[in-house]
Amino acid sequence: MRFSLIIPCYNEADTIPLLLERCKEVIRYPDVEIILVDNGSIDNSPKVLLNLLPKYPGCRSVRVEKNKGYGFGIISGLQAAKGEILGWTHADMQTDPQDVLHGLKLFDKYGPNVFVKGCRYGRPFTDTIFTIGMSVFESVLLGKRMWDINAQPTLFPRSFFEAWQDAPHDFSLDLYAYFQARNSKIPVYRYPVLFGKRVHGISRWNVNWNEKRKFIMRTFDFSFQLKSRIKKGMK
């Protein structure tokens, strides 16, 4: 298996039908699988997946019985994946799953041992300012150039994932993976990805400035943990 794409789904019953349709183009490629992680959903997601997945060869699901965080869902999918190249993206359709096809071309161009990540455009002005601020903070604190940390998709070789230790179970997973690539001196390649509106539902963190504040505080806490581990010689 060449590539496995992980898509964590939490209460995305209304989005899953469109998501699977957009995955059609991805699974047309040989040796590709898509794993939709039912990340402890309490809506109708399990039933929707059960009914629709047989219509989409190349797509399968993994069930997490209790939601333990965005990162936990992704890690659960990565552990079940068979691909030599692994990656993830979001289920909310703000980034199209077909964006991974452009990312895979960078592996063809630069070789198997690279870290590939989208770079968002088309976002609201306030969100862009927020991203700039967080990028500058992380770059200064961690001593590595970090930009648009939460952009999707994210792709990397299986060997990179197998070297992870104590990866976070929340939204800090994006920061962890990106930093590990920088810290390990794996070549990082970015490419533009259009960031649209959610098809259904609402974001769990990007609702208002109070939720953003909570997200910032959690990210700061994990960032300082990373900084501490750097001082202790984290590999």
Image (spheres, rainbow, N blue to C red):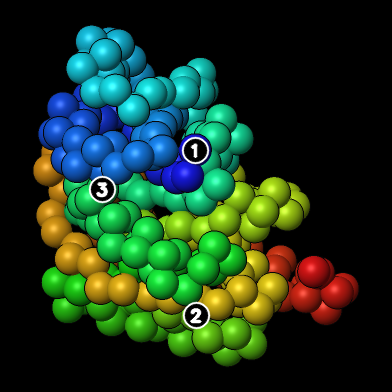
Q: Nearer the viewer, residue 224 or 20?
A: 20
Q: Is residue 7 left or right of residue 26?
A: right
Q: Is residue 133 left or right of residue 72?
A: left
Q: Residues within 10 Å of mark 3 (few under 14, many from 20)?
A: many
Residue at image mark 2: 146
N-terminal of the pair, mark 2 or mark 3, is 3
The residue that appears at 56% across and 30% down in the rendered structure is: 80
Do tag 3 and tag 1 residues touch (Cβ < 8 Å)? no
Residue 1, numbered label: 1
Eyeballing the image, is 142 above or below 196?
below
Q: Nearer the viewer, residue 82 or 220?
A: 82
Name the kind of residue labelled 1 in the image.
Answer: Met
Name the kind of residue labelled 2 in the image.
Answer: Met
The residue that appears at 19% across and 36% down in the rendered structure is: 24
Q: Secondary structure at mark 1?
A: loop
Labels 3, 1: front one:
1
The residue that appears at 29% across and 23% down in the rendered structure is: 57
Labels 2, 3: front one:
3
| Structural distance between the alpha carbons of marks 3 and 1 | 18 Å
Residue at image mark 3: 97
Q: Secondary structure at mark 3?
A: helix
Q: Residues within 10 Å of mark 1 (few under 14, many from 20)?
A: few
| Structural distance between the alpha carbons of marks 1 and 2 | 31 Å
Q: Quadrant of the C terminus?
A: bottom right
Name the kind of residue labelled 3 in the image.
Answer: Pro
Eyeballing the image, is 5 above or below 178?
above
N-terminal of the pair, mark 1 or mark 2, is 1
Rendering coords of residue 186 (x, y %): 61, 74
